[in-house]
Amino acid sequence: MMRRRPLTLIQDDLVDYEKAMERMAALVEERQDDARPDTLWLLSHPPVFTVGKRTLESHLPDPAAGIPVVPTGRGGQLTYHGPGQLVGYLVVKLDTGEGVVDYIREVELRLVEALAALGVHAERRDTPPGSELLTGVWTRDTGRKIVSIGMRASRAVTSHGFALNVEGDLTPWNLAIPCGMPDVEMTSVAHELGRASMEETRRAVATAFESS
């Protein structure tokens, strides 16, 4: 059983990615200075591809697709954001001796719990020996990826977070190599269940993160 780690909840609808990065940086600075509590910010973005530091050029989308590609300071590889996807930015002060990967594992388990509440059986996966860190959440029955995760920590405070596909268009994922995995098939709550509610998903995620 996971220990209690309640987070203060901020909610927005559609926020431009680069504006969100500015606000997230401010939230991180406040947390580093103990001027705010641990925080979960739930929002969505207009269509954008974001790329981590290790993303290969061959994994990028064709510019003809017309979707902006923005470099980001998080870990992880290429991710697509768009309407119908729930993004969660986690600004959390790590405990002494706790690393960002330790916290990512907790995030995965909390998202598995949220998806179970929605009726989607999901799981996290262990990183195969010798492979790059495997993060995210997959559907147990169909083996598709439903959550992407990319985070970093600075002065013991995390930033960035997760993207959970709820009900949006999945076709932009096919324009590039998501998460550095050529064989991955992305999915959404709507694709798995035949129905989805962004409001219900927000509530399930907030509950799983003990957020209010």
Image (spheres, grey):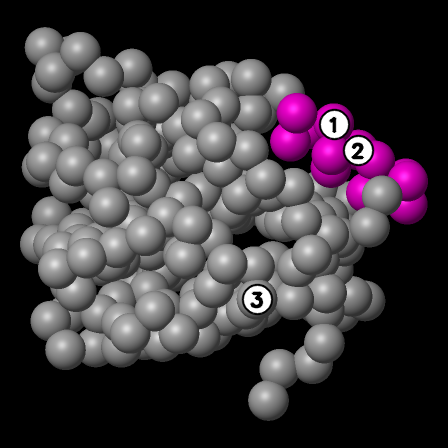
Provide residue 110's location: percent of width, then percent of height.
50, 70
Q: Which residues are magenta?
A: 23-35
Let me know if residue 163 appears in the view: no
Q: Nearer the viewer, residue 159 or 9?
A: 9
Tell me whether circle 3 and circle 1 mark residues in contact (CB < 8 Å).
no
Q: Earlier in the sequence, mark 3 or mark 1?
A: 1
Residue at left offset 83%, top offset 35%: 30
Residue at left offset 21%, top offset 77%: 140
- Find disc 2 in the rendering and name its residue: 29
- Find disc 1 in the rendering and name its residue: 26
What separation in Å lies between label 3 and label 1 (alpha carbons)? 25 Å
Question: Is disc 3 placed on a helix, strand or loop?
Answer: helix
Tell me whether circle 2 and circle 1 mark residues in contact (CB < 8 Å).
yes
Residue at left offset 74%, top offset 27%: 26
- Find disc 3 in the rendering and name its residue: 207
What separation in Å lies between label 2 and label 1 (alpha carbons)? 5 Å
Task: State which mark lies toward you, 3 or 1.
Answer: 3
Q: Nearer the viewer, residue 72 or 194?
A: 194
- Relative height, residue 129 to residue 190 (above, below): below
